[in-house]
């Protein structure tokens, strides 16, 4: 390998890039990784980690209210956004530095500048230096995709939401996917007036219909205003600094902050043409089952390939790449039954086929549901029903999908996803004795 400066050059120190570099280094490769911003990528810096902390912070609004029904004398409480924001950002810095230490401990050279591809085996750094590599891994992730409308620069994205100087009194969120519903819940719990505008009448496309409907019903009941067939057209800034959002089929919406949550676009402005790395029709790097691009020495993992835009998937891809190329342990990521969750209020989670996808694939399927009010919610007087749904193969009894909305649904689903991934039957669930009293016991009591 003496012909190259390094065995592996990774562009992007997010979840996929960091995993790939430390595993490759562990297999004995000489590895360098370039990051133009902070180590950790979207998940750590402006995604999963700070978002989940905001979700925890937001949920205290309900917990404090419910505590009174459990006998606690809770005085009127005030929420201080800046305290939470600063504590969350400090935690982000802590986690980011742990990622940096992990790289150093594994002898991965961290280059803190922008890098682009300059040929099949060459990377050019912002400083002008060129580094040659036997292999290049692109793990640059994605960035918010903002519709090209007049006044779009007045809007923010989830990137900026973590840094707001103050909480908006009124926020309009464009989109109805993961980010829109998670932030709608967060801002609503903090006391903002939230309007979610969506170009169709489908929220969280891809999730089970009944579960999405339950989220819509609960969120609307709490006071989040959903406007459908309301494609965003224009944002106007008024003299007092407030904004006016023009949308199709509805009156203009006055607000203080507009947040775009309209999908994420792979970050591919990287000189890829110098190595004939092709993009697919979604603008993502085209890769084969082993994460190899159309250039034999260049690979890509994570959101930049737009297969499934989830951190644990990027991590698995990074691991598979490093083990296959440097560890003599070839393996591929299995994309079947990948669990996912939306950290809304309440959260939802799912694994496997939705009812409609299962019907399309198998014709008829058996569906079992449990529609219940969590014990805690009953005493709290919180009229919020959980819904668990199991989709079962008509002949083999194998559980094809599990979908849930309710308190702690993602925590419960992660464990149940093992059973679905293992191909267990509904009978196996039924044979398991309930753990009482829990919400999760509904999984083994569905009739
Ligand atoms: P999503 O793909 O989940 O949702 C995008 C939303 O924006 C959809 O409602 C879509 O409508 C709408 N939309 C897209 N383009 C336009 C447009 N031009 N004008 C108006 N509306 C538009 O993307 P997010 O941005 O919410 O999240 C990006 C990805 O990040 C997710 O797909 C997910 O993989 C990941 N993520 C995961 C989280 C988790 O695991 N909990 C949390 C946050 C993000 P339509 O349905 O009509 O296309």
Image: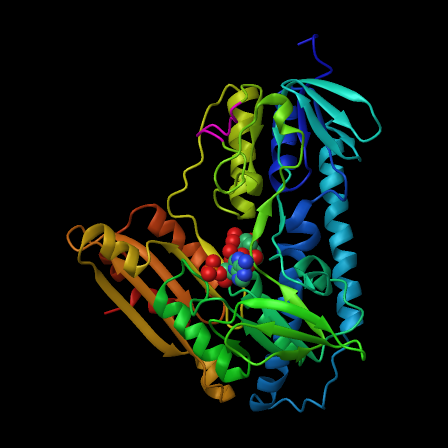
Return the x and y of residue 75 as percentages of the image width and height. 72, 90
Q: Foreground residue, 225 or 409?
A: 225
**Is most of the magenta stretch helix, strand or loop?**
loop
Q: Which residue appears at 42% of the width and 60% of the height? A: 205
* Residue 5 seen in render: yes
Return the x and y of residue 15 as percentages of the image width and height. 62, 42
Q: Quadrant of residue 66?
A: bottom right
Q: Foreground residue, 178 or 79?
A: 178
Q: Which residue appears at 77% of the width and 20% of the height? A: 130
Q: Foreground residue, 157 or 410?
A: 157
Residue that extends furthest to the top in the rendered view of this protein: 2
The total of numbered circles placed on residues is 0
Return the x and y of residue 311 as percentages of the image width and height. 56, 47
Q: Which residue appears at 78% of the width and 63% of the height? A: 87
The magenta segment: 287-294
Q: Give yes or no for residue 332 being in the magenta stretch.
A: no
Q: In which quarter of the image is residue 122?
A: top right
Q: Which residue appears at 52% of the width and 38% of the height? A: 316
């Amino acid at each position: 390998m003496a012909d190259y400066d390094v065995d592996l050059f990774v562009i992007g120190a997010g979840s996929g890039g960091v995993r790939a570099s430390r595993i490759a280094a562990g297999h004995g490769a000489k590895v360098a990784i370039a990051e133009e911003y902070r180590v950790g990528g979207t998940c750590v810096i402006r995604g999963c980690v700070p978002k989940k902390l905001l979700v925890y912070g937001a949920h205290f609004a309900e917990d404090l209210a419910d505590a009174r029904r459990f006998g606690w004398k809770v005085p009127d409480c005030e929420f201080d956004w800046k305290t939470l924001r600063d504590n969350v950002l400090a935690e982000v810095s802590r986690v980011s530095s742990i990622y940096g230490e992990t790289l150093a401990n594994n002898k991965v050279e961290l280059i803190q500048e922008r890098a682009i591809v300059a040929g099949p085996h060459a990377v050019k750094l912002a400083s002008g230096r060129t580094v040659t590599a036997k292999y290049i891994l692109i793990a640059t992730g994605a960035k918010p995709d903002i519709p090209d409308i007049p006044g779009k620069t007045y809007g923010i994205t989830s990137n900026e939401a973590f840094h707001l100087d103050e909480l908006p009194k009124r926020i309009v969120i464009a989109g109805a996917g993961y980010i829109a519903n998670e932030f709608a819940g967060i801002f609503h719990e903090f006391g903002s007036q939230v309007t979610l505008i969506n170009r169709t009448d489908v929220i969280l496309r891809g999730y089970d219909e009944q579960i999405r409907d339950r989220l819509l019903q609960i969120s609307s009941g709490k006071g989040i205003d959903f406007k459908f067939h309301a494609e965003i057209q224009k944002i106007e800034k008024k003299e007092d600094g407030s904004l006016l959002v023009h949308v199709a089929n509805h009156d203009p919406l006055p607000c203080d902050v507009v947040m775009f949550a309209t999908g994420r676009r792979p970050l591919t402005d990287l000189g890829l043409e110098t190595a004939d790395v092709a993009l697919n029709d979604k603008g993502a790097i085209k890769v084969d089952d082993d994460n190899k691009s159309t250039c034999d020495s260049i690979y890509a993992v994570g959101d930049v390939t737009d297969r499934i835009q989830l951190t644990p998937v990027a991590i698995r891809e990074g691991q598979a790449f490093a083990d296959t190329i440097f560890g003599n342990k070839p393996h591929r990521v299995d994309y079947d039954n990948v669990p996912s969750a939306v950290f809304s209020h309440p959260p939802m989670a799912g694994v496997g086929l939705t009812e409609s996808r299962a019907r399309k694939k198998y014709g008829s399927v058996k569906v079992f549901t449990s529609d219940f009010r969590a014990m805690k919610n009953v005493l709290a007087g919180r009229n919020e029903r959980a819904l668990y749904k199991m989709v079962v193969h008509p002949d083999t009894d194998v559980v094809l999908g599990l979908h849930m909305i309710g308190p702690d649904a993602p925590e419960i689903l992660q464990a149940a996803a093992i059973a679905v991934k293992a191909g267990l039957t509904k009978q196996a669930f039924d044979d398991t004795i309930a753990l009482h009293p829990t919400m999760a016991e509904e999984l083994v009591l569905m009739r």
